[in-house]
Image (cartoon, helix red, strand yellow):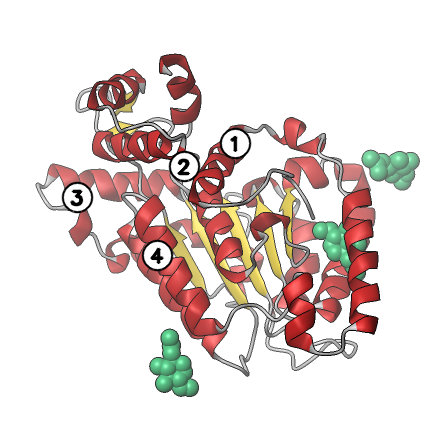
Amino acid sequence: MKLLALPLGGRGSLLLVGCVLWQLSPAAQAVEPISLGLALAGAAASALTGIISYPKLYCYFAECCLQRPGARSGAALQENLDQKLFGQHLAKKVIVKSLAGFLNNSNPKKPLALSLHGWTGTGKNFVSKIIAESLYEGGLNSRYVHQFVSTLHFPHRQNITQYKDQLQMWIRGNVSDCARSIFIFDEMDKMHAGLIDSIKPFLDYYEELDGVSYRKAIFIFLSNAGAEKITEVALNFWRSGKRREDLSLRDLELSLSVFNNKNSGFWHSSLIDKHLIDYFIPFLPLEYKHVKMCVRVELEARGYEADEDIVMQVADEMTYFPKEERIYSDKGCKTVCTKLDFYL
Ligand SMILES: *[C@@H]1O[C@H](CO)[C@@H](O)[C@H](O)[C@H]1NC(C)=O
Ligand SMILES: *[C@@H]1O[C@H](CO)[C@@H](O)[C@H](O)[C@H]1NC(C)=O
Ligand SMILES: *[C@@H]1O[C@H](CO)[C@@H](O)[C@H](O)[C@H]1NC(C)=O
C-alpha cells in the first residue's frame, strides 16, 4: 500500500518524508494513487521470478520478502532510532528489543503486535516508518508494508461489514504472499470495534488459519489512547525533581493498565482481554530541548548548518503546557517542518 510516493534515498530524503508524513492530513494522503505503479512493479517482479530462479539474484533486481537478516534489521533499527528519535528512551528500548528478538526467532508462536501510545507529534508515525525501513528497503512504500488510517480507509460506519471482509481478505492475501508482512493501523482509537474484532484471529496463537500462518507477521497499532495518563506520570515525575531518563516502564505500566481496563471506549479492550498485544509502548510528551533537536536534524536534512538562532526561534514559537510551567510541547515536533519553512 503506497501512501507516499516520494523517493526514499539517503538519510536526508528519509527524514523529509518523515516530516511530510507528519503534516499530511488523511485527506491529502487519499490523493495518492496506488494501483498502477504497484501493479506494473508486481507484473515485472513475477516475470523476473520466472526468468531468474536464484533468489539472491532475483532480490538484487526486485524487492524481496526475504528481508534483511534479523540481526542486521535490529542494528539498522537501533541506529536509526538513535539518530532521529528524541526524548523517547522507553519506546526506543522496547521497540529495539522486541523487534530484534522477534526477527531473530525463526519459529515465533504468534505474530508480533505492538501498540504505540502518545500524543501526536511525539513520534509514533515516525517510528513505524523507521521500523518499516529497517526491514524493507522501500520502507512504507514497500509492497510488504501496509498502512491503514481509520478515518481514511474505513470512514463509514454503515459499511463496516464490507470493510471487515476486505480487511481480512487483504491481510490473508498479503501474508500468503509474504509471511513477514507489516501492517500498521493508525488512529486505532477511531477504529470501529467490529473492525478491530475482525483482525483478532490473525493476532492469536494459531498455527495456521485456512492454510496460512500469520506468526511471522508484524502488527503495529497507533493511538492517542492513554496519552493523558502518560503525560500525567511524566509531569509528576518532573515535578518531583527526577530525571526523565529515569522514568521506567513500570512507572507507566500501571497507568497504561488502568486506562486499558477502564470501559470508556478504549479501542483495544477486546485485544487486551485476550492478551494479543505483546507490548504497550508509551511515547512521552516532548520538551523544549527535544524540539530543538528535531529542528537541528531537520535543518541538516535540508542541507543547512544547524544555526542555533533559527533552532531557538523555531522552538520558541511552539506552544508549551501546562500553563504555569510550560514544559511540554503541545504538538511535539509535529509542526517543526512548516515553521522552519518560514525561516529558510
Ligand atoms: C539470536 O538468536 C541466537 C540463538 O538462536 C542468539 O544467540 C542471539 O543472541 C540472538 N540475537 C539477538 C539479536 O537476539
Ligand atoms: C457503503 O455500502 C453501500 C451499500 O451497502 C454502498 O452503496 C456504498 O457505495 C458503500 N460506500 C462505500 C464508501 O463503500
Ligand atoms: C494487500 O493489501 C493491499 C492493501 O494494503 C491490498 O490493496 C491488496 O489487494 C492486498 N493484496 C492481496 C494479495 O490481498
Measure the C-alpha gap from mark 3 to mark 2: 18 Å
Q: Which mark is residue 237?
A: 3
Task: Indicate the quadrant of ligand 1 in the picture.
Answer: bottom left
Pointer 3: residues within 10 angstroms few (<14), some, or many (20+)?
Answer: some
Q: Are marks 4 and 2 in contact (CB under 8 Å)?
A: no
Measure the C-alpha gap from mark 4 to mark 2: 24 Å
Measure the C-alpha gap from mark 1 to mark 4: 22 Å
- Of 41 and 78, which appears nearest the observer? 41
Measure the C-alpha gap from mark 2 to mark 1: 18 Å
Residue topped by disc 4: 79
Q: Secondary structure at mark 2?
A: loop
Residue topped by disc 2: 119
Closer to us: mark 4 or mark 3? 4
**Can residue 64 be seen here?**
no
Pointer 2: residues within 10 angstroms few (<14), some, or many (20+)?
Answer: many
Residue topped by disc 1: 20
Closer to us: mark 2 or mark 1? 1
Q: Secondary structure at mark 4?
A: helix
Pointer 1: residues within 10 angstroms few (<14), some, or many (20+)?
Answer: some
Q: Quadrant of the C terminus?
A: top left
Q: Is residue 130 above or below residue 62?
A: above
| Image spot of residue 277 (x, y percent) | 50, 63
The amino acid at mark 4 is: Glu
| Image spot of residue 133 (x, y percent) | 51, 54
| Image spot of residue 329 (x, y percent) | 30, 28
Closer to us: mark 3 or mark 1? 1
Q: Earlier in the sequence, mark 3 or mark 2?
A: 2
The amino acid at mark 3 is: Phe
| Residue at the left extreme, as displayed | 241
**Can residue 210 be seen here?**
yes
- Of 66 and 150, which appears nearest the observer? 66
